Amino acid sequence: MKADPTLIPGLIEEAIRWTTPVKHFMRTATEDTELRGRGIAKGDWLMLCYASGNRDEAVFEEPYQFRVDRTPNRHVSFGYGAHLCLGQHLARLELRILFEELLPRLKSLSLDGEVKLTQATFVNGPKRLPIRFDLV
Ligand code: HEM
C-alpha cells in the first residue's frame, strides 16, 4: 500500500466486503416470487444476510480470499435497492483519507496480541485490536 497508493480504493472496497460491518436488514415481500427454487410469498419476512451475500461463490471468485485487486467488487455491504446506504460515499472518502494520511507516516505496523470482535448481531467490528507501530 505504501509503495502503490493507487491500490487504496481496492483495499477499502475489499475490506468493506470482507468485514461486512452491517450484518443484516429485513424486507417484506410485496409479491409472490421464487428465488433459486425457493418460494417466497407476498408478506413473507426476509432476512438479508449481507455477510453471506458477500461470500456468494456465484458472484465472487475465491470469496474467502482477501484480494485488493478484486474487480468488479459487487459486494452488498451497503445494502441494495431503494434503501442503499446514503452514507456510502462519505464512508469511502473517510477511509481513503485515513489511509492516504496514515500510510506515509508509518514505517511498520504489526499485530501485537489477540484480536477480539464485538459480539453484536447487527453491526460488528473490532472490540480489541492491539498493534505495534513505528513512525517514519
Ligand atoms: C462502512 C460504513 C457503512 C456501512 C457498511 C453501511 C451500511 C448500510 C446498510 C447495509 C444500509 C441498509 C441498506 C438497505 O437496507 O438496503 C445502510 C443504510 C443507511 N446508511 Fe449506511 N453504512 C455505512 C456508513 C454510513 C454513513 C457514514 C452514513 C451517514 C453519514 C450512513 C447513513 C445511512 C442511512 C441514512 C441509511 C438509510 C437509507 C435508507 O433507508 O434509505 N451510513 N447503511
Image (cartoon, rainbow, N blue to C red):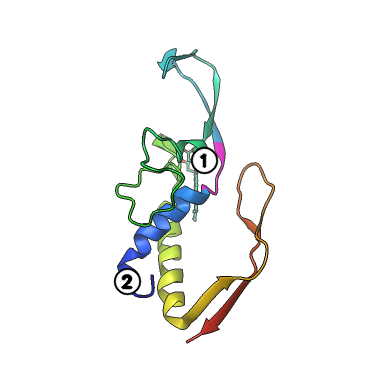
Which is in the foreground here, disc 2 or disc 1?
Answer: 2
Which residue is painted at 40% across and 43% down in the image?
Answer: 62
Q: Is residue 87 visible?
A: no
Q: Is mark 1 within 8 Å of ligand 1?
A: no
Task: Locate residue 41 relative to residue 120 in the image: left or right.
Answer: left
Locate residue 36: give its quadrant: top left
In the rendered image of this protein, does residue 78 appear above or below residue 10?
above
Circle 2: residue type: Asp
Q: Horizontal and vertical percent for residue 87?
A: 45, 52
Q: What number is the disc on residue 51?
A: 1
Q: CA distance from mark 2 to mark 1?
A: 29 Å
Q: Is residue 54 left or right of residue 127?
A: left
| Boundaries of the magenta span | 20-24
Amino acid type of disc 1? Ala
Above/below status of 31 relative to 112: above
Q: Can you say which quadrant of the picture contains the N terminus?
A: bottom left
Q: Which mark is residue 4?
A: 2
